[in-house]
Image (tube, helix red, strand yellow):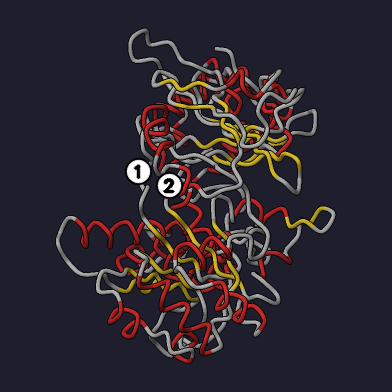
Amino acid sequence: MDARPVSRLPITTTTSEWEYSSRQWGGYCTKRPGNEGSAQKSIRDFSCSMTTTCGRSGTRRSCVSLRTARTHSPMSYVEGHDAHRFAAAAGTKPLKGLRVIDAGNMVAAPFATVLLSDFGAEVIKIEHPEYGDGQRRLEPIKDGIPLWWKNISRNKRCITLDLGRPEGAEVFRDLTKQADVVVENYRPGTFERWGLSWESLHELNKQLVMLRISGFGQTGPYRTRPAFGRVAEAMSGLSHLIGDPDGVPMSPGYPLGDLIAGVFGAFSVMVALRHRDIGGGPGQMIDLALYEAVFRLLDFDPIEYDQLQNIHTRTGNRVAYAAPSSTFRTNDGKYVTLAATTQRIWERLCRAIEREDLLDDPRFVDNPRRVLHSEEINGVVERWIGARTRDEVTTRLDSCEVPHSAIYDISDAFRDAQYLAREAMVRVTDPDLGEAVVQNVVPKFSTTPGAIEHLGASMGAHNEEIYGGLLKYPREKIRRLKEEGVI
């Protein structure tokens, strides 16, 4: 397999040489507007598509199909003359034609909408005209450019609008009339205070789906409390499970709760659209609480407590339901994690560490007894791994088909053969950064893959396009709204 690391993507001589379309590769390349024939010695003008398997030969194509970055919108690009080339080259994106208004802030709602935008939804991102989305002020920031914003706002069309002003709310209503989906994650009551309740928006557009993400949901005694992912991780019980047995409860150090809610949000939008478009039902409002999204992932916790009165607590790097399991240090200062969750894996592990005598040890004959004696069996594995380098350990475990992984940091991912072979990261051109590496679209579709058209845009970058084009506001009205600070 010809794996192409992001640092070794194909170099082009001229952009015109790359113009082609290919059903077989499932990708396409086009000339960059306004740059025809210019000499290029790097991949700055291109962003990456996907790899597929050739249906006729079974040969995997790792060409890293290149796509030019475009300054105009994904939706307008596939209209008219270019639509035929787009459809022939890569297949229409599955969410093409879906219009989403992203009125969210920070992480949860924007992550839900970026998942939709990756597969072709037209996402119109609303920011306050003065201070923008709070995501723009989160680290990491390079030379004033918010890097997280660049990724979580990719493929979106960015406009500015003050929803808290009557004129801004009226503009929002005009947008809602032409939308399939509205997404927001303000505290309950905020949209109502702005005159933008679900009932009023639904009256304007009976087909509208509205996703409302909040810390504790739209109902209940905690509904008006502010919350972020860390709060949801705590209240859901997730933080109670993370950390050492004699240590304090911990959070992941990353807003996992917000991101989990974003995934549930994107999923719920598609369920509601399915009901609307296939079931013939109307649009509806989706009430998603951060803590409930995280709580849903703790699948066995409620039923175990109800039936057995067990309360799980922290087990460090071990899992409570299988042994041996932990993260083990190698003699070169690296770490490897594994868990023998089935009897067959346990047998393979014994062969890998050359301790098949353990298979006859009554303490370890099955998983329940191994869990009772987890200290002893983890100690055996710890000593074996601790006497070897990470590469020696992973090579031996691989040879015996024992599920495991080295603990990666991001630099490991950039070098790893599996990441590179599957193009888990792609290099995208950007007017602010030149080019940047981000995660590819997940998951990979065989016929209608998603794509990254561009990274997060500047505030109000698409104001003229949306207000003058989509809403067809006269120039005088746009000028007045801007002068008054509404947009």
Q: Is residue 203 above or below residue 347?
A: below
Q: Nearer the viewer, residue 7 or 389?
A: 7
Residue 164 x, y percent position in the rendering: 55, 86
Residue 318: % across, % down: 57, 47
Q: Residues within 10 Å of mark 2 (few under 14, many from 20)?
A: many
**SS type, badge 1:** loop
Do the CB atoms of the residues marked 2 and 1 lie less than 8 Å apart? yes
Q: What residue lies at 61% left-to-right and 39% top-to-bottom?
A: 69
Residue found 48% across the figure and 34% down from its top: 340
- Amino acid found under the numbered disc labelled 2: Gly
Q: Residue at x 24, y 56 (%)?
A: 274
Q: In the depicted view, which residue is nearer to us: 81 or 245?
A: 81
Few, some or many residues within 10 Å of mark 1 (<14, 14–19, 20+): some
Q: Quadrant of residue 99?
A: bottom left
Q: Residue 120 got which mark?
A: 2
Point out the image quarter for the C terminus.
Answer: bottom right
Instruction: Locate the N terminus and report the quarter of the image it occupies.
Output: top right
Measured in 3D between alpha carbons, the distance from the residue under mark 2 to the one under mark 1, in whole angstroms, is 6 Å
Dot placed on the residue nearer the N-terminal end, 2 or 1: 1
In the picture, measured across the screen, residue 175 lies left or right of residue 226, that is: left
Tell me the SS state at disc 2.
Answer: loop
Quarter of the rendering containing residue 47:
top right
Q: Measured along the vertical axis of the image, is residue 370 above or below residue 165?
A: above
Which residue is the site of mark 1? 94
